[in-house]
Amino acid sequence: MIDEQMAVFIGSGLRLAVPIIFAATGEMLSERAGVLNLSLDGMMLMSAFTAALASWATGSPLLGVAAGVLVAMAVAAVQAVLSVTLRANQLVVGIGFNILALGSTTFLYREIFGPLSRDPIPGFAQLNLPWLAHIPVIGPALANQTGLAYVSILMVVVTWLILKYTSFGLAVRAVGEDPRAADKAGISVAKTRYLGVLYAGILAGLGGAFMSVADSNTFTENMTKGAGYLAITAVIFGGWNPWYTLAACLLFGFATALQFLVPALQLDVPVALLLLLPYLLALVAIAGFVGKSRQPSALTIPFERGG
Amino acid sequence: MVMKNPKLARVAKGARLELVPLQVLVPVVSTIIALGIGLLIIAATGASVLEAIEAFWDGMAGSDFNIGASINRAISLALVGLGFIFASRANLTNVGGEGQIAMGGMFATAAALHGAGDLPLGLAFIVPLAVGTIAGAVWGGLAGFLKAARGTNEVISTLLLSFIALPLVYWSVESFHLLRKPISDVSSLPESAEIPDTTKLPLLFPDNGSPLHIGLLIAAIAVVVVWLVLKHSTLGLRLRAVGLNATASRRAGMRTSFYVILAMTVSGGLGGLGGAIMILGQQFYLTSDFSSGYGFDGLVVGLLSRGSAVGVVIGALLFGFLRSGSINMEISAHVPSAVVLICQGLIVIVIAGSAILTNRKVTR
């Protein structure tokens, strides 16, 4: 009984962590380049909706994911124009996009899906990898995931490799720490930041699409429920390091899953306290009470050449 | 922003004078464009635009009741917006209005339900208002303290504090030990009991059925006070100095930490007052999502105003009426109120994106 509940808990913790892992990993790279996308939640929500719509229309969840990622990239592109070229306040732009995403997805959902909102949309099947399933306790939870869930871990590895071993990664780090010096060294600050934001868009798109097409096989209004903010929090919590960020995402996933486990175990802990736990942890983390992490020096500061 | 020589400063001042119309023009034009897009979207759904506008107008100002309800909404938005511009005078961005409203409303409800109801001389509603204001002030001040003591970015901390406040409200209406009303029948929802009549804000026009309450006077006083402090007081000047250059201000002998904490405390307190007024003025009992959307609306109002208290009043009225209208549009013309969210999002993005037009010449 307890074993079974643990397996369910671990499984749901992982599933809840996956979208945050995607979004946080992309956001981490963008922030290393100096651009904070508060619009992450909006990108995820738009992608979740578009993926659901495209998957429903074409019958292919893969096309759904592709469409979701494209829309998230489009949002990221506009965010990049505003925050890099027009040097707008990155935080304000992000909040604007989140309001816009909530409004447009809610509106379109009611217009398009309104009458048939109960039907599940085509989604991915769980892979059920036999060699993973044999691991005790965590095995079944690890094995019963969709392919997209494993992609999220792959993206963490890829992002780590990009940052550490590629010239683009070097450019990202340089631009986020000292854009003026990077500019003098011949690195295009604007181009690097555009690519960083687009990268965040792709991954946020994957995370959003995972929610609708892989996890729940449906779209619901405001279905991200602030997952994008949680991802940004995870980046801060993880000290802008891909592995610590991954750990923070897993922590948030399990903290969120606790709200299902605690009542099942008949423990008398208010659900609300579990809901606010990730944010409280994050607040403690950014206040610098847990280790000392330093944000990229040029984070949220627009760069103007020769200014 | 720092002028190196007097000549340059004069040139910049000239440029700023030219820019005054632009600073009014940009919000006005973007609002009109966004509303135009909203109308196009309504037309695209095949709904009758005329019918939608009619329903919208009816909801905004169709009766004394609707006008009163719209202005009541505007009151809370104006207070959050004032809080936003107060903090932004010190170059601090308070995006935690939602959490500050939530804390204000929750503590005001607690005060109204537990003790304040029997107080004489109007204290029955004044005490809950004060308690709500203090709760919001603490919530905002916490972000100010973290900024001053630990260098924590206030945008992120106020946002996180909102995400912490909302589950607290949820908890308070879920738990019978806190504010949840005792279950009387099977359909009892997780919400607080209704506050005593004595703690409800007195109506301004009790005879014509308008729900407009004395919150309007409170907001009007707040507008004047914030305007005086920001434009015509040493405190306003000091906040500005701290915001523009903390290091220079510190060298000039100012306790910058104090001003950072003060700015965020006042900002949060105004949001808390807005939340308290929502409960005491119109909603009368606490629900878990009573603050839904007001924080962001108030933030948008603050942004649109570009730091002017008069701008806050105009923006708050605009959004108060927009919200009332959109709700009625959804009910009677079946146009989703999300259209108004789309318009709001567009307004914020366009104004943020056009900041380069209004700010650039000043810095050059």
Image (cartoon, grey):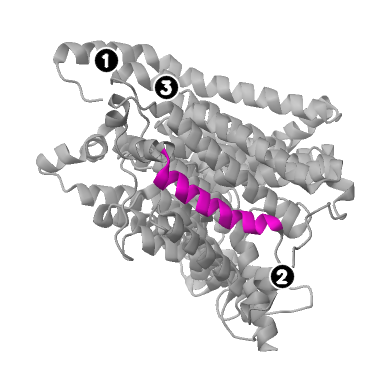
Q: Share a chain, discs 1 and 3? A: yes
**Left or right, B118 with reference to A99:** left
| First in sequence: mark 3 vs mark 2 | 2
Q: Nearer the viewer, mark 1 or mark 3?
A: 3
Which residue does the numbered mark 2 point to in the structure image?
B189
| First in sequence: mark 2 vs mark 1 | 1
Q: Secondary structure at mark 2?
A: loop
**Left or right, B266 with reference to A268:** left
Residue B356 got which mark? 3
Residue A238 got which mark? none
Q: Judge whether residue B275 is colored magenta.
A: no
| First in sequence: mark 1 vs mark 3 | 1
Dots 3, 2 in contact, CB < 8 A: no
Name the chain under label 3. Answer: B
Q: Judge whether residue A150 is colored magenta.
A: yes
Which residue does the numbered mark 1 point to in the structure image?
B13
What residue type is disc 2 on?
Leu
Seen from the viewer's position, the closer of residues B58 and A18 is A18
Q: How far apart are labels 3 and 2 at the CA level?
A: 49 Å
Name the chain under label 1. Answer: B
Q: Share a chain, discs 3 and 2? A: yes
What residue type is disc 3 on?
Ile
